[in-house]
Image (cartoon, grey):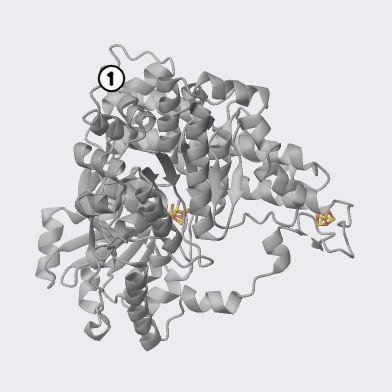
Amino acid sequence: MKDWASLTTIEEMEAATNSLLENAEKVGADTWQQRVKNQTPHCGFGEAGTCCRICSMGPCRITKKSPRGICGCDVHGIVARNFLRFTAGGSATHSDHGREIMHTLHQAKEGGNYTVKDPDKLIRIAHEWGVETEGKDIYDLAHEMAEIGLLEYGKPFGTQRFLKRAPEHTQKLWHDAEIEPRAIDREVATALHMTHMGCSSLPEALIRQALRCGLSDGWGGSMMGTEFSDVLFGTPKPLDTTANIGVMEKDNVNIVVHGHDPSLSEMVVHYANDPEMIAYAKSLGAKGITVSGVCCTSNEVAMRHGIPMAGNFLNQENVVLTGACEAIVVDVQCIFPALGPLSKCFHTKFITTSPIARMPDSEFIRFNAETAGENAKAIVKMAIENFKNRKPELVNIPSQKQNARVGYSVEAIVKVLDGVANSQVDEFGTTKPLLECVTSGVLRGAVAMVGCNNPKVRPDSAHVGLMKKLLENDIILIVSGCSAQAAAKAGLMDPVKAKEYCGDGLKRVCELADIPPVLHMGSCVDISRMLILAAELSKDSGIPISQLPVVGCAPEWMSEKAVSIGNYVVASGLDTFLGVDPYVKGSTEVCDWLTGEHGVKDWVEANYTVEQDIEKLGDLMIERIEAKRAALGI
Ligand code: XCC
Ligand code: SF4
């Protein structure tokens, strides 16, 4: 038995949360823990996906006694339509994030609020897209690329530009299955059209569109979001930071950033580091300013600036419950409307910034590219001036904190692993050293672990439990989103500590490359980085993605985005393991299409596994990885 004592355990994190819930009780605040109780048990029709309310003849609910809706739609059609709509919601959301980034790029200018921080990457993508760069001003090029990228959302003809990054084998599968995504918005619109009353009720057609709509996110909107965020804010490189609630500092003004779009958080971080602002904070009795984050906006600024990560999705109320949060500043997605009333129970300012995410009981400071600097400064100032309103008797910051090395973009992974094997690497580096580790068996394989928390799973227990199990089995982890933060909070991104929990092979790789065994690849849109890595591994080895000993996993997922992600990960050839059911269990046909041997697997060589028993989920992943190795004869 290994000694896990140096990590922060789930029990310890829970104890910290419980101490914060005492604060909630003191001020009479409502928390998700309480609301879950009020909402349980959930509606069985909703859970099984068997309720239809897409027209006003309904809602229709399918039972043994009433096997069809009023229009005659059967349970399979209803479940499949719901699944496609869920996907479309996620794809639209991720892709709109990408679109915002393209608009920000379009506003970038020399000396402006936003500049081009990675011109080489911009030029590289321009060449990929066949755009002339010779002799062009970098900002002219940026604006031209922004316009071309924005047209990917609505172009009338053709398919997504980034599909060409996939191995030819994958591109052919997509072509043959007719799931190459066209314009991003079109795939969302097609999904909504297909699921309108009186259109598709054939599961096969609906699931096909779910894959295509997902692909338009993964290889379209999300990939643009990631790539051009790197262009604007810099491509992440390994750097050290800290994680868990103890990153908030009692004597400092605490600003927590939350949401997804780095355009806001980058500016907040910039002004929080401004000497003038720090002096102002000091003049009002604080020792300094601490910016920390929750959810993906936190991942973005952690990856690029080492901003500490206070927590993940189900910790968002915790940061307010510390009584030491002067402002929680949010942009879009995954923000609990609960933060409004909750912040009112404390001195915390709840600041919304995007017309996309408006909430009651918040202060709205509309953020946009032209005024970003002023907006961010106003927000930081507001937080500083709020420091004096703290109620000292309510301040409770649990001391949990772990070191975490983050910043593993594909570029960074390729670079650090060059040091491990002695293979020749070309100018841009290749994934060959990583492949050698895998073929030699030093590493058995890799798991891409992603996604949220969900109160249906004990928070973080599935993420962390699975990670430990996989590490012991010499399986390296690439992670993003709230899964990454679960790992970081536990200590699994501490390169010194975490390697002690690995099998011998993985431990050796970590030591030689000086990496943690759980590699933080970024936010949710950055799952596109994982696609690129898988594509590179496939191209460098000549092995189709589906045959590589690599699988995807979202053990605690909750959002529509996660289903869109699941669809593009599966459609890219990676078997995907879910710990929460995507509301499809009401239809045997839909389950067969998604999880069977002859459903989506016939199109894209991969499928889903849904298993709520997390131990079993881990065993199934290891089995699948070993089966892939055996099939390759490695
Ligand atoms: Fe949201 Fe991206 Fe999920 Fe976390 S992991 S709860 S989607 S913040 Ni993407
Ligand atoms: Fe009922 Fe059909 Fe209308 Fe759905 S589309 S609510 S199943 S009548």
**Tag 1: amino acid:** Asp
Which residue is pictured at 17% across the width and 68% down the height?
252
Residue 485's spot in the image, x, y percent?
Answer: 35, 56
Left or right of 458 on screen, residue 440:
left
Note whether residue 256 is visible.
Answer: yes
Residue 527's spot in the image, x, y percent?
Answer: 44, 41
- Ligand 1 within 8 Å, label 1 CB: no
Query: Which sits in the foreground, 103 or 41?
Result: 41
> Circle 1 — which element?
loop
In the image, residue 450 sits, relative to residue 232, either above or below, namely: below
Which residue is pictured at 16% across the width and 53% down the height?
273
Which residue is pictured at 40% across the width and 86% down the height?
25
**Number of residues whose C-alpha sits closer than 10 Å to that of mark 1, classed few (under 14), some (14–19) or many (20 or more):** few
Note whether residue 95 is visible.
Answer: no
Which residue bears the numbered disc 1? 137
Q: Where, quadrant-wise, is the C terminus in this rendering?
A: top left
